[in-house]
């Protein structure tokens, strides 16, 4: 089974993807994670990618399609969760073609619908464990013990360079200009499902589970 988690920054795509990886052994393909890895590679491409990402703009279709193609070629079983990809109509077309080449199809596109004002609050307090990737929030989901990850006991945390109010405005603009047309695109293809991304994590994952079980 292959699915897309679609929604603006801060909609909860990463949190839900991690739950599906744990529960169903699916493979999370996050272009954001792949690009953050490329950013630290010290290559010319890494520097270019870092500049674009830190401004909150989209990296070129060619780069992200290439990254996804590479990862899909090396992965087997489990089914894919596409998280943060596709973000443009060209990427959506390319994904359809890639899946067809692998003899696969998309089973569901889950739009995680959220209110814009809530996103700003969610994103600006977000941090993750550097060791296991668990996601926290200063106000709504702090660690139980200050400075120690609840999941793995790690003591090193990361805040993304683009999780600030200015970059977020740009990321939202990119979402509405270039990514939100995908909602109509997948609706017309008959694969769109909508969940309320503002519900608590357990309720969102129950809604996601329901979509997957009937797909
Ligand atoms: P994310 O972790 O999904 O929020 O992505 C962080 C940043 O990486 C985005 O703001 C873009 O700069 C870049 N990025 C991630 N995925 C894509 C994509 N599919 N197409 C273009 N840029 C992307």
Image (cartoon, helix red, strand yellow):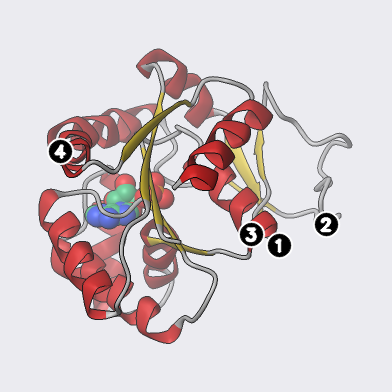
Q: Nearer the viewer, residue 202 or 160?
A: 202
SS at badge 4: helix
Q: Earlier in the sequence, mark 3 or mark 2?
A: 3
Q: Measuring from the top left, give residue 75's x and y in whole percent.
A: 46, 81
For label 2, the crowd category at 10 Å Cα-Cα, with few meaning under 14, some 14 to 19 and many 20 or more, is: few
Residue 137 in the figure: left or right of residue 71: right
Classify 66 as above or below 178: below
Which image quadrant for residue 69? bottom left
Pick whichever of labels 4 and 2 is earlier in the sequence. Answer: 2
What's the CA distance linking mark 4 and mark 1?
A: 41 Å
Please tell me how crowded label 3 is: few (under 14), some (14-19), or many (20+) other residues with Cα within 10 Å: few
Residue at image point 29% right, 43% down? 191
Q: CA distance from mark 3 to mark 1?
A: 22 Å
Q: Nearer the viewer, mark 3 or mark 2?
A: 3
Looking at the rendered structure, the secondary structure element under dot 2 is loop
Q: Looking at the rendered structure, which numbered label has been put on residue 24?
A: 3
- The reply to whether discs 2 and 1 touch (Cβ–Cβ < 8 Å) is yes
Residue mark closest to the camera, 4 vs 1? 4
Q: Is residue 172 visible?
A: yes
Which of the two discs, 3 and 4, labels the residue nearer the N terminus? 3
Residue 53 visible to the viewer: no
Q: Earlier in the sequence, mark 2 or mark 1?
A: 1
Residue position for label 1: 131
Q: Are marks 3 and 1 in contact (CB under 8 Å)?
A: no
Q: CA distance from mark 2 to mark 1?
A: 8 Å
Residue to which mark 2 is pinned: 152
Which numbered mark, 3 or 1, is in the foreground of this view?
A: 3
Rendered image: mark on residue 188? 4
């Amino acid at each position: 089974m292959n699915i897309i988690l679609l929604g603006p920054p801060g909609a909860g795509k990463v949190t839900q993807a991690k739950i599906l990886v744990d529960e169903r052994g699916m493979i999370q393909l996050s272009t954001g994670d792949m690009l953050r890895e490329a950013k630290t590679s010290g290559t010319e491409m890494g520097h270019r990618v870092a500049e674009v990402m830190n401004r909150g703009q989209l990296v070129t279709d060619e780069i992200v399609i290439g990254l996804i193609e590479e990862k899909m070629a090396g992965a087997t079983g489990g089914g894919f969760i596409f998280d943060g990809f596709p973000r443009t109509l060209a990427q959506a077309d390319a994904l359809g073609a890639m899946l067809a080449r692998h003899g696969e199809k998309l089973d569901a596109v889950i739009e995680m619908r959220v209110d814009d004002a809530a996103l700003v609050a969610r994103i600006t307090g977000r941090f993750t464990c550097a060791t296991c990737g668990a996601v926290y929030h200063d106000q709504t989901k702090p660690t139980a013990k200050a400075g120690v990850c609840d999941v793995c006991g790690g003591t090193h945390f990361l805040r993304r360079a683009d999780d600030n109010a200015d970059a977020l405005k740009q990321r939202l603009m990119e979402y509405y200009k270039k990514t939100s047309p995908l909602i109509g695109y997948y609706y017309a293809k008959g694969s769109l499902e909508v969940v309320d991304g503002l519900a608590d994590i357990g309720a969102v994952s129950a809604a996601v589970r329901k979509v997957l079980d009937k797909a």
